[in-house]
Amino acid sequence: MAITSVDDIASGLASQQIIRFMKVMNSAKAAGAWVSGWKAGGFPGAGSDAPAYTAGSGYACDSSTVGAIPYANASAANWLARLTGSVTVAGTIILYDRLWSCSGMGFAASTYTVTTPGSLPARITDGGVGCEIWIEQFVAAGAATGTVTVTYLDELGNSSTGVSPTVASAPTIAQMQPVRLQTGDRGVSQIVSAANSATWTSGSYGITVMKRIAEIPVPVPGVNMVCDWAQVLASIPSDACIGVMYHATTTTGPVIIGSASIIDK
């Protein structure tokens, strides 16, 4: 069912489901960097390890995946209608649906081909429109240079390549680095491979595909920010693997506390 009026939202909020989260985040590599909350302690606890890119199974994530923020599927449809958050260090909290993740890609100047299937979970029915590719640091790495090129299928099933900005040297655990999609692409439906343009001295990384649900900026540390439905209204598919990431303003590791109101309409 679609929301057609403010009255629909108001009636949904009368019986809202409130989900809460608290994460003790790793330090950011630098101001302006992104930090994953997937393996961070707190509530929910640290997420499960992503399988190696050669595993051939287990890549897709859902609400049963260890580390997902728990919530109940709707009888009609879930909608995010309110989001609150505070952080001990100013930054932006990002709520997202974690769709697919792998690990174990080394830092040799080589291509790492995903053992199939590299496709997204069945709850994504639009070819992955709006989905994003990220390099996720599960193991700290040494000195680095160059870029990472990810080969993927776009929302129409066409083969495409996305390239990261120059990778951060010596990335820390939990660092996230974005991969720009090929010009004209609106999403991603499958990961095929990743290739490094140069050799890093040590470590490994993974590829994570996610879809943002909402963001809440926290410009003042410790202040609880509130975004109502006009700012965050978004559909949440059944069985979503809801996770948290953080866009940092300093290298200090923050504590994130927040809640989300989900309505059934």
Image (cartoon, rainbow, N blue to C red):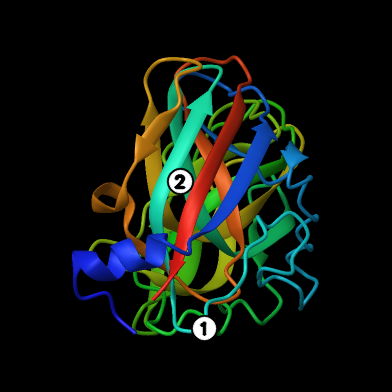
Q: Is residue 212 left or right of residue 169?
A: left
**Other residues around mark 2 within 10 Å, as few (<14) / some (14–19) / many (≥20):** some
Residue 75 circle label: 1
The label number, if any, that marks residue 178 in the structure image: 2
Can you see residue 162?
Answer: yes
Check disc 1 and report its element: helix, strand or loop. loop
Visible residue check, residue 148: no
Pick the residue in front: 56 or 64: 64
From what the image shows, is residue 23 above or below residue 88? below
- Indicate whether 251 appears above or below 40: above
Mark 2 and mark 1 in contact (Cβ < 8 Å)? no
User: Residue shown at 67%/60% (left/top)?
Assistant: 70
Report how far apart the C-alphas of labels 1 and 2 lie in the structure.
Answer: 35 Å
Asked if residue 73 is positioned above or below residue 67 in the image, the reply reads: below
Q: Nearer the viewer, residue 258 or 11?
A: 11
Q: Amino acid at mark 1?
A: Ser
